[in-house]
Amino acid sequence: MKKLASIEEFQQMKESSKHLFMFSADWCPDCRVIEPFLPELEEKYKDFTFVYVDRDQFIDLCIEMDIFGIPSFVAFESGQELGRFVSKNRKTQEEIEQFINQL
């Protein structure tokens, strides 16, 4: 999974093709639970580029995007938000797949 390097990179990525941004943090236990199956999701949904956004590094972006719980997912295609799965609750692989399938 690609790791977001800058706000400028976020702006460029969300304006081009399909990106699925995963807002997370190293200290987040619920984020660690989903880590083992993330490579499987990336393989299954190759039409999306998965991007890790560190909540602590990009706290202003999280506030701007109304990301108040992690892990959270926001999908964009060519500048349009396709959908968001944003909450403070632990997420299962099935829930994440349902979210991606409805995009």
Image: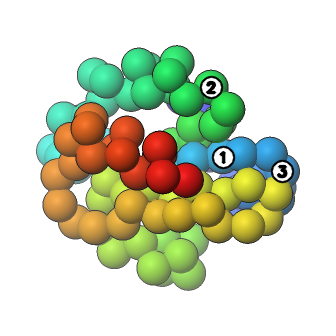
Amino acid at pointer 1: His
Q: Pinpoint residue 34: horizontal percent, then vertical percent.
A: 26, 35
Q: Residues within 10 Å of mark 1 (few under 14, many from 20)?
A: many
Q: Which mark is residue 16?
A: 3
Q: Is any part of residue 85 visible from this angle?
A: yes
Query: Residue at coordinates 47% horizontally, 44% vertically from top-left?
Result: 101
Name the colour scheme. rainbow
Read off the residue under disc 2. Answer: 46
Q: Is tag 3's residue or tag 2's residue first in the polypeptide sequence?
A: 3
Q: Residues within 10 Å of mark 3 (few under 14, many from 20)?
A: few
Q: Is residue 76 above or below residue 50?
A: below
> In the rendered image, which quarter contains the N terminus?
top right
Q: Residues within 10 Å of mark 2 (few under 14, many from 20)?
A: few
Q: Nearer the viewer, mark 2 or mark 1?
A: 2
Q: Pinpoint residue 73: horizontal percent, then vertical percent.
A: 44, 55
Asked whether disc 1 touches disc 3, contact meaning CB atoms under 8 Å apart, the reply is: yes
Q: Is residue 51 above or below residue 65?
A: above
Q: How many marks?
A: 3
Read off the residue under disc 1. Answer: 19
Q: CA distance from mark 1 to mark 3?
A: 8 Å
